[in-house]
Image (cartoon, coloured by chain):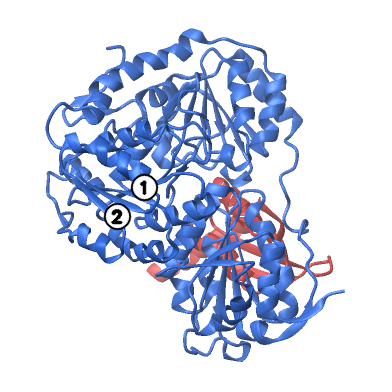
Chain colours: A blue, B red
C-alpha cells in the first residue's frame, strides 16, 4: 500500500527508487516546491548546484558518460528550461541518457504567456527522445518510471518531464513501479538470424575486412565481445571519436581513430577494405568525408540498435538491427578463425609515415613554443593512461582524441555530434562526481572555457577535483585553422583577448600554474595530477597550431593533408 | 506522391512532433487526416507528401522512433499523384494564358 505524498515528494521518492543519488540543478519559481521538499532529502539525494542550467545538463551528460547511468537535471520553467536545450540536443545526437525535470507554471496558466512560461513540450519534441507534461500528482511516478526506461534503453537519449505546479503541490498516492514495457516502444529484439548468417559469409570471404566501431560498443557493454570478434576474424579496427577507449589503445588489432582528423591507417584502410563492418556508429560526415566516395571497394555490414541509422548515409549490403553485444557474440560464433596478417600489418606502415610527418612534429618538437599535442601526450604518459579525458570542442578536442591513450573503457567524454563549445568544463564536473575515484582531466581551449566558465564556482562550492588543462593560444583555433587553410588567412573574429586566468583561478580559490616553456611542462603536469584538489594548468601553446592530418571537407578519406603544403601519397 | 500512414497512442503534442519530421527535411505535407483507428485507444494519421522513396522510408523510420508511435508505413500514391499532377498542370496553363 502506498503513501499520500505531494507530487514534489513523489518526484524525489521516484528518483531514489530509480537508484538516483545525485542530481544537477538550479532552483527557480516554478520548481521551488521540489527544492523545498529536497531540503528534507539531503541525506538521500545529493544536489549539485551549478551556476547556469546549461552547466547542469552538460554535467549530467558527463556523469552519464562516465557511469553509464542516466544523469538527472532539475531546473525551473521558462529560461531554466530553454537554457538546457543545447544540452538536450547534444545528448540526443550523442545517445546520452539524461532525465530532465523542468518546472512549469500551473495548469490554468498554460498557454497564457504567464511569467516564466514557455512551450517546453513544443521546443523539446524535435531534439529529445521523449517529452511528457505532468499535470497531476498521480502521473508523477509513472512518468518518472517511463522516463528512466526510455532514456536508458535501446539507443539511449534525453527525456524531458515538463512538471506543472499543480502536479508538484497536489497530493496523490505514491507507490513506485519500475517501467519495463511500453506497448508502442519496442526494445531491441534478438538480431535476424539470416542477416547474421549473411554477414558471417561476407566476413569469411573477405580478404581485407575492416571494422569501424562507435559508442554503441560502449553503450551495450560490448567491449569484450568486440575484442573476441576481432581476434577470431583477424580484423583490424578503427574507432569513431565517440568510440574511443572502447578498445585499449595498444590492442593489437586497433589502428586508431577514423575521420577528418583521424589516423592515416584508419582512413586509408577504410578506402581499401573489401568488407567494412560498422558497429554501433552512424557514419557521421566527420567520419565519412564525401559519402559517395566512402569505402568504394567494400561491401558494408552495418550493426546498429537504431533502425533509422542503417542505410541512412551509407548503403548497407547487410544491415543487422540489434544490440552490439548480442550481435557480436553470435557473429563471432559464426565466423571462421582467419588471419589477414599482411593486411592488418599494413597499418604499421601508415603509422610510420604519420608518426614521422605529424606525430613527432606535434608531440616532440625540439624547439619553439609548446604544442597542444605535446601537452596531451605528456598527460597521457604521466597519468599512466588511467585518466578519464574530457574535452571541449575544437583543436583541444581533436588533439585530445589523437594523442590520449587509454587502457579502460568510458575514458573519453566529448561532444561529438553537436560539437558544443562550453561542454567540457561542466561535463568534467559531472564525470568526476560520477567517478570520484578516477582522475578526470579536462582539455579545453581559451574560447570554450569562457562559454561556461561560471562553473568554476560549482567546482569551488562542491570541491570537485577536476584537473583543467587550458590549451591557451589566444585564438578560436579550429576556426582559425580553417581560415588559414581555406579562407586566405583572413582571420575574421577568431582572435581572443584573454583575461588573466591566474586572477580568475585565484578568485575561485583554485590552484593554478601557467606553463610557457617546454622545460616546465612535465613538472607542472605532475603537480596537477598529484593535486588532491581542482587545478588549472594554463598552457600557453603555439598560437598558430594546426591539427593534422586532415581530410578537408568535400574530399575523399584518402586525400589527406599532412601539413599545409603536403598531401599524403600512398605507397611512399 | 507518397502516403505515410501512422498508428499511435493518443498523446498531446505528437502531431506537431511528427509534422516536424517532415519540416526538418523540407518536405511539404500536401494533406493530413487524423482519426481514431479501428483499434481502441490508437489513432491513425495519414500524411500525403511529394517526396522520394528514400526520403519517405527515412521519414517513416524517424516517425517510428517516437515513443508513442506504434507503427508507421509508407506507400506510393501513383494514381492520385498523376491525376493531381494533371490538375496542377491545367491550373498553371490556364493561369499563364
Q: Residue at x 47, y 59 (%)?
A: A59
x and y, in percent, of residue A127 in the image = 51, 61
Mark drawn on residue A511: 2
x and y, in percent, of residue A439 in the image = 44, 44
Mark drawn on residue A531: 1
> Is residue A436 or residue A540 the one in the foreground?
A436
> Is residue A113 or residue A47 the one in the foreground?
A47
The picture quadrant where one finds residue A1 is bottom right
Question: Image height check: is A503 above or below A347?
Answer: below
x and y, in percent, of residue A488 in the image = 12, 44
Chain holding disc 1 = A
Question: Image height check: is A10 above or below A330?
Answer: below
Q: Residue at x 71, y 45 (%)?
A: A188
Which class describes the residues within 10 Å of circle 1: few (<14), some (14-19), or many (20+)?
some
Instruction: From the viewer's perspective, tell me whether residue A253 is left or right of residue A353.
Output: right
Which class describes the residues within 10 Å of circle 2: few (<14), some (14-19), or many (20+)?
some
How far is the residue under mark 2 from the one under mark 1? 9 Å
- Is residue B77 visible in this depiction of the protein? no
Question: Image height check: is A26 above or below A412?
Answer: below
> Is residue A172 or residue A38 the one in the foreground?
A38
Amino acid at each position: 500500500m502506498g503513501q499520500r505524498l505531494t507530487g514534489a515528494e513523489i518526484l524525489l521518492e521516484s528518483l531514489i527508487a530509480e537508484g538516483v543519488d545525485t542530481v544537477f540543478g538550479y532552483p527557480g519559481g516554478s520548481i521551488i516546491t521540489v527544492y523545498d521538499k529536497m531540503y528534507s532529502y539531503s541525506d538521500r539525494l545529493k544536489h549539485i548546484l551549478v551556476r547556469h542550467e546549461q552547466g547542469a545538463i552538460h554535467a549530467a551528460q558527463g556523469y552519464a558518460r562516465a557511469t553509464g547511468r542516466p544523469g538527472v537535471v532539475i531546473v525551473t520553467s521558462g529560461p531554466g528550461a530553454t537554457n538546457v536545450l543545447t544540452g538536450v540536443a547534444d545528448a540526443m545526437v550523442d545517445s546520452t541518457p539524461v532525465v530532465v525535470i523542468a518546472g512549469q507554471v500551473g495548469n490554468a496558466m498554460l498557454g497564457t504567456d504567464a511569467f516564466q512560461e514557455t512551450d517546453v513540450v513544443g521546443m523539446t519534441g524535435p531534439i529529445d527522445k521523449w517529452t511528457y507534461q505532468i499535470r497531476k500528482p498521480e502521473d508523477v511516478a509513472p512518468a518518472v518510471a517511463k522516463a528512466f526506461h526510455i532514456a536508458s534503453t535501446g539507443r539511449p537519449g534525453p527525456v524531458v518531464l515538463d512538471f506543472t505546479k499543480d502536479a508538484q503541490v497536489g497530493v496523490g498516492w505514491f507507490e513506485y513501479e519500475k517501467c519495463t514495457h511500453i506497448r508502442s516502444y519496442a526494445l531491441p529484439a534478438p538480431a535476424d538470424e539470416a542477416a547474421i548468417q549473411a554477414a558471417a559469409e561476407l566476413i569469411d570471404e573477405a580478404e581485407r575486412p575492416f571494422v569501424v566501431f562507435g559508442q554503441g560498443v560502449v553503450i551495450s557493454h560490448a567491449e569484450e565481445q568486440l575484442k573476441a570478434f576481432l581476434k577470431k576474424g583477424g580484423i583490424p579496427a578503427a574507432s569513431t571519436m565517440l568510440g574511443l577507449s572502447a578498445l585499449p589503445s595498444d590492442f593489437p588489432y586497433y589502428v586508431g581513430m577514423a575521420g577528418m582528423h583521424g589516423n592515416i591507417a584508419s582512413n586509408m584502410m577504410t578506402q581499401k577494405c573489401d568488407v567494412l563492418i560498422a558497429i554501433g556508429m552512424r557514419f557521421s560526415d566527420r567520419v565519412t568525408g564525401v559519402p559517395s566516395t566512402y569505402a568504394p571497394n567494400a561491401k558494408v555490414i552495418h550493426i546498429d540498435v537504431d533502425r533509422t541509422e542503417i542505410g541512412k548515409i551509407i548503403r548497407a549490403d547487410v544491415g543487422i538491427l540489434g544490440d552490439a553485444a548480442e550481435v557480436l557474440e553470435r557473429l563471432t560464433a559464426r565466423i571462421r578463425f582467419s588471419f589477414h596478417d599482411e593486411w592488418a600489418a599494413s597499418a604499421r606502415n601508415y603509422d610510420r609515415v604519420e608518426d614521422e610527418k605529424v606525430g613527432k612534429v606535434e608531440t616532440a618538437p625540439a624547439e619553439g613554443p609548446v604544442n597542444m599535442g605535446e601537452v596531451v601526450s605528456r598527460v597521457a604518459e604521466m597519468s599512466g593512461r588511467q585518466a578519464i579525458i574530457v574535452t571541449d570542442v575544437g583543436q583541444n578536442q581533436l588533439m585530445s582524441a589523437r594523442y590520449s591513450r587509454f587502457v579502460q573503457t568510458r575514458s573519453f567524454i566529448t561532444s561529438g555530434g553537436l560539437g558544443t563549445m562550453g561542454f567540457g568544463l561542466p561535463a568534467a564536473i559531472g564525470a568526476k562526481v560520477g567517478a570520484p575515484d578516477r582522475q578526470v582531466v579536462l582539455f579545453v581551449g581559451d574560447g570554450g572555457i569562457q562559454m561556461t566558465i561560471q562553473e568554476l564556482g560549482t567546482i569551488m562550492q562542491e570541491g570537485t577535483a577536476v584537473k583543467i588543462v587550458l590549451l591557451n593560444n589566444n585564438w578560436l583555433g579550429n576556426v582559425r585553422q580553417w581560415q588559414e587553410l581555406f579562407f586566405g588567412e583572413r582571420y575574421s573574429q577568431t582572435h581572443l583577448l584573454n583575461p588573466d586566468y591566474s586572477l580568475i583561478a585565484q578568485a575561485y580559490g583554485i590552484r593554478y600554474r601557467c606553463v610557457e616553456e617546454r622545460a616546465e611542462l612535465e613538472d607542472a603536469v605532475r603537480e596537477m595530477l598529484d593535486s588532491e584538489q581542482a587545478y588549472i594548468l594554463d598552457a600557453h601553446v603555439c598560437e598558430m597550431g594546426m591539427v593534422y592530418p586532415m581530410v578537408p571537407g568535400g574530399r575523399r578519406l584518402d586525400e589527406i593533408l599532412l601539413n599545409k603544403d603536403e598531401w599524403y601519397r600512398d605507397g611512399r | 506522391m507518397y502516403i505515410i500512414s501512422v498508428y499511435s497512442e493518443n498523446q498531446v503534442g505528437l502531431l506537431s512532433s511528427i509534422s516536424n519530421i517532415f519540416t526538418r527535411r523540407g518536405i511539404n505535407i500536401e494533406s493530413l487526416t487524423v482519426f481514431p483507428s479501428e483499434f481502441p485507444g490508437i489513432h491513425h494519421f495519414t500524411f500525403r507528401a511529394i517526396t522520394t522513396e528514400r526520403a519517405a522510408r527515412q521519414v517513416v523510420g524517424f516517425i517510428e522512433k517516437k515513443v508513442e508511435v506504434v507503427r508507421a508505413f509508407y506507400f506510393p500514391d501513383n494514381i492520385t499523384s498523376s491525376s493531381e499532377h494533371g490538375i496542377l498542370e491545367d491550373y498553371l496553363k490556364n493561369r499563364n494564358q
